[in-house]
Amino acid sequence: MPKPEVDPTVQLELSVDRSSPVPLYFQLSQQLEAAIEHGTLTPGSLLGNEIELAARLGLSRPTVRQAIQSLVDKGLLVRRRGVGTQVVHSQVKRPLELSSLYDDLEAAGQRPATKVLVNTVVPASAEVAAALGVAEDSDVHRVERLRLAHGEPMAYLCNFLPPGLIDLDTGQLEATGLYRLMRAAGITLHSARQSIGARAATPAEAERLAEEAGAPLLTMQRVTFDDTGRAVEYGTHTYRPTRYSFEFQLLVRT
Amino acid sequence: MPKPEVDPTVQLELSVDRSSPVPLYFQLSQQLEAAIEHGTLTPGSLLGNEIELAARLGLSRPTVRQAIQSLVDKGLLVRRRGVGTQVVHSQVKRPLELSSLYDDLEAAGQRPATKVLVNTVVPASAEVAAALGVAEDSDVHRVERLRLAHGEPMAYLCNFLPPGLIDLDTGQLEATGLYRLMRAAGITLHSARQSIGARAATPAEAERLAEEAGAPLLTMQRVTFDDTGRAVEYGTHTYRPTRYSFEFQLLVRT
DNA sequence: GTAGTCAGATTGTCCGGACATTCAGATTGA
DNA sequence: TCAATCTGAATGTCCGGACAATCTGACTAC
């Protein structure tokens, strides 16, 4: 039987700045998250009860609860009635994000490069129109890109965007990722519907990715929605599985 | 320029039962979710302001806010300061879950079948020990299963579990999924770290899945954690990509 | 010694109110 | 006509309190 792993309550130096425009609960949650990230709050350690914590910080209990709740939602803390709130002891890094291949590669120190193959406006096919929620044959942007790392092709990305949202400059597309451009254009990315599969490379695909025909490819299709629920991007991507795989953290929703 | 899409406020029949042990905010959120699912609340429609809604239901505003917030977290609603709360207009079905292959197949009406190939206890390899956070060479359960749909093999699943958590009955494993067994054993699944990739099938893998050697396979590795952050399962799965792909919904965390 | 019971601690739920912040549209001014 | 300003409406933040539900550990009774 495993030991109950009782850890003493940790005393932290926490403080909030009431003159700051940053919400108090957010200030607190950031400090707590930093303490967890930094290791000051060790996995399994108790956080101390909410009421005492609120009193120590000069905050109300709802405010403290809001801060804690946001970290629970992120999967960093666990609350147990009658027991307390403790830090989860696992290698939870980041809960999960709308991953951007560009950012992923950059974070891995791979110095990604992008080659824009196509950047034009085309009439929407039935598939694209359905994904983006626009009329068939209406104009949409079409962008085809080849993403490279260390000079080697890694992925072939084909994206469609509804018109009027953003002007796609080829130079900017080669310098950064599509998601960054969209965010910079004031589009708030909210959710995405993804499908990940695999198949054998066609001769044309193999040629583009410097693979051989019939080689396994990792495929991903994605429709991205902004905060109003409007589809803002549809993409069909193929990846070289020897160079890239999808890694992410899932949280169970109850 | 797209039309602002003004939709009239929808009047719903909502009610709460104060004698029920179900929390009031949960009753409300369920009714709202049902209305969205059912189409009574159409995408883009406004929900009516929180204060008036609270008054109509005889609830306080924080309670109503808690109900709405839970649906916002699920990605079903969007709040806009100064405007109101509206239903997202997109084909958002399920935010995202810790998908279980068994449940996925059953939901698709595929009548899944499982064949347990191996159900034994083995010493943990370095890889398994690292994933589960146990000592190398310590005992772990090893389960190998073949999952079939319509008599055709779909996936080969190899899982490792730490000892003492659950007793793995081969009959039960063939009748349902591993996750259901774990939940039934009182284990609260909390999060998982996944990696999805692809590769060519080895001759042995091809044989198991009735594919040809060199055929593309979809691979998934997963470590699952319970609500205390302890690893409760590590699995290495291979799927036939012609029969299965991963579909899920991502939410952007801010 | 063992099982059941009880009390304390802690989070869960809910209330009612107050003020700040932001958005959209109407008004006003140049 | 167009831009800047104002106003109303709605959500965002925060407070202080009250009671309920649940878990842990200690106590008690057998």
Image (cartoon, coloured by chain):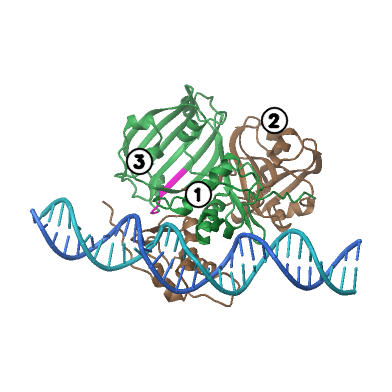
Chain colours: A brown, B green, C cyan, D blue
In the picture, the disc for residue A203 is 2
- Tell me the CA gap for discs 2 and 1: 61 Å
- Does B223 lie within the magenta span? yes
Judge by depth and name the residue closer to the eye, B80 or B205. Answer: B80
Q: Could you confirm whether marks 2 and 3 are on the same chain?
A: no
Question: Would residue B101 appear left or right of A234 to someone viewing this image?
Answer: left
| SS for dot 1 | loop
- Marks 2 and 3: which is nearer the front? 3
On the image, numbered disc 1 is attached to which residue?
Answer: B15
Q: Amino acid at mark 3?
A: Ala
Q: Is residue A253 visible?
A: yes
What's the magenta region?
B222-228
Percent position (x, y) of residue A5? Answer: 31, 59
Judge by depth and name the residue closer to the eye, B16 or A5. Answer: B16
Percent position (x, y) of residue B221? Answer: 48, 42
Label 2–label 3 contact, CB within 8 A:
no
The answer for which chain carries disc 3 is B
Q: Quadrant of the C terminus of chain B?
A: bottom right
Total number of numbered labels? 3
Q: Is residue C11 above or below residue A152?
A: below
Judge by depth and name the residue closer to the eye, C12 or B29. Answer: B29
Q: Is residue C29 above or below residue B206?
A: below
Q: Is residue B254 visible?
A: no
